[in-house]
Image: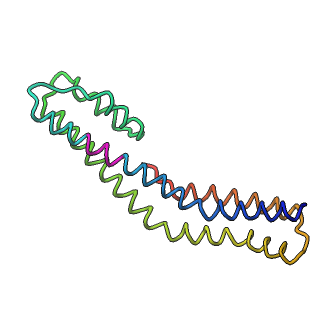
Amino acid sequence: MTTELTSLSALLMLAFVLSWPAMLAWWRRGESREASEVAGAIEAFAADARRATRCLEVDVALAARVARLRMPELGAFRLAPTLPNATPELVADAAARLASRLRRRIAFERKMLARTAPGRRRGAIAGAMPPIVLLAITGVGAHVPTAALLLLVIAQGTGCWLQARIAHVTP
């Protein structure tokens, strides 16, 4: 019973560690795609603000999308139309600068994620070696100590946490 449970645990950890970088990359691509769409919406707002005769307010839905990206510049962007000397050109420039900053941030993050992808892949393969060894030992019929399994779970969890920290680029 313990041998089957050990094998199953090792297989599940192996699958998790090998799929972790791919799942993280998939999630980051979705975040990057959303940020690109927000940058496009901000650029459209800038074009509308340039054509307007008076200062336009920032759309609530657009402000909510920018807020989900946790950009610290959002406060200044929302303040620009309410300034006493604000002109449509000033609001449009502020929106264009915010969109440009967001596009640069997206480009930087994509570049950093592309540079670290091979290292994450090597880390996932190296992290998969202990479960493979445990599976081989169990397959031969040897008894795997519970302490070794516990140590493996702790090491795998730490490795997954480190991979998550490496893959996350803070703005």
Q: Is residue 26 magenta?
A: no
Q: How did the renderer colour the structure?
A: rainbow
Tell me the residue at 48%/66% (across/down): 116
Q: Is residue 39 magenta?
A: yes
Is the residue 2 above or below the residue 80 in the image?
A: below
Say which of 161 and 83 sits in front.
161
Q: Position of residue 5 (x, y in %)?
A: 84, 60
Q: Position of residue 76 (x, y in %)?
A: 30, 33
Is the residue 116 above or below the residue 91 in the image?
A: below
Question: Which part of the image, by quadrant, shows the N terminus?
Answer: bottom right
Say which of 147 and 72 sits in front.
147
Q: Is residue 26 left or right of residue 60?
A: right
What is the magenta segment's predominant secondary structure?
helix
Q: Is residue 76 left or right of residue 56?
A: right
Tell me the residue at 31%/53% (across/down): 104
Q: Position of residue 133 (x, y in %)?
A: 77, 74
Looking at the rendered structure, the number of numbered marks drawn on it comes to: 0
As drawn, the residue found furthest toward the bottom would be 140
Tell me the residue at 37%/50% (across/down): 33
Tell me the residue at 53%/61% (across/down): 22
Highlighted range, magenta: 35-41
> Quadrant location of residue 149?
bottom right
Q: Position of residue 127 (x, y in %)?
A: 67, 68
Q: Is residue 26 left or right of residue 47?
A: right
Q: Is residue 76 left or right of residue 13?
A: left
